[in-house]
Image (cartoon, rainbow, N blue to C red):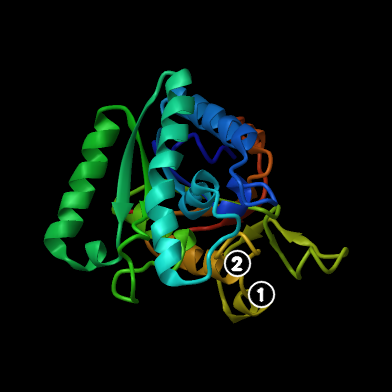
Amino acid sequence: MSYFRDSRRIVVKVGTSTLTHSTGHLNLRRIEKLVKVLSDMKNSGIQVVLVSSGAVSAGVAKIGFGTIPETPEAKQAMAAIGQSELMKIYDKFFSDYGHTVAQILMTKDVLTNPSRRSAAENTFNRLLEMNCIPIVNENDSVSTDELTKFGGNDILSAHVATLCEADLLLNLSDVDGFYDSDPRTNPDARLIERVEEINDEILAIAGGAGTARGTGGMIAKLNAAMIVTAAGIPMFILNGQEPEILYALLDGGHIGTYFCAPKSKK
């Protein structure tokens, strides 16, 4: 089965832990590899939307702050500094492979306001028609409460996938997929390759928060999977440490964990 054969539009989410070194600085080699693979996807005729974390880390590195700040105000300032730096890096790498990028910063209230949601849908569609690659992030500099914050890019990517009417969501993580227990602490943990339904048993397996550099965790990814599969959009959880593994999907293989969509998308 080829998961790309009938996919004309794909959303790819990449988290901070995938984009950065253990020092917190951006992993430029991995970012360039990711850009190369996504450019190949684009060259094959697939429309690509990238949901990317990393703005705060980029801001910390740019200003020489040292560590990720703890206060919300400082994090918002780092995001404001780092977002332009992150886009500069993406623009440079994608340009090397002949593609144009566009930045979209979103807040949660875009989804609940009909006119703003319609404007966002039109913007995404027009950018993709113009052969651009939209790069999306939460507007951390102004998102301050539950009405405006998505609570992480796992949830943001799910909403972007529904907003764009994507055919597939690829959630790149720092693990190989969804396991029956935590593979970091249990060497006998078993990878679940296919999830037909996210039920109470599946939810009970998921742990808590993410890594020191990330804000997600498996429960956030399951919540994202529930959002997109309810809209008829399947999702993969994949390891983004080596972006070239995405070629296996392009070639018709199966990697990571596949969350089935229970109904066909309208």
For this orientation, the residue located farthest to the left is: 115
- Element type where label 2 sits in the image: loop
At a point 35% along the width and 54% down the height, the residue shown is 160
Q: Amino acid at mark 2?
A: Gly
- Residues at circles 2 and 1 in contact by the CB criterion of under 8 Å: yes
At a point 41% along the width and 30% down the height, the residue shown is 91
Determine whether 149 is above or below 163 in the image: below
Query: In this orientation, does residue 71 appear?
Result: yes
Coordinates of residue 135 in the picture (x, y in percent): 38, 42
Mark seen at residue 95: none
Residue bearing the label numbered 2: 217
For this orientation, the residue located farthest to the right is: 187
Task: Indicate left or right for 20 with 43 as reference.
Answer: right
Give the camera-side residue of 164 and 151: 151
Mark positioned earlier in the residue sequence (2 or 1) = 1
- State which quadrant residue 216 falls in: bottom right
Task: Indicate left or right for 112 with 222 as reference.
Answer: left
Residue bearing the label numbered 1: 207
Q: Amino acid at mark 1?
A: Gly
Determine whether 109 is above or below 193 in the image: below
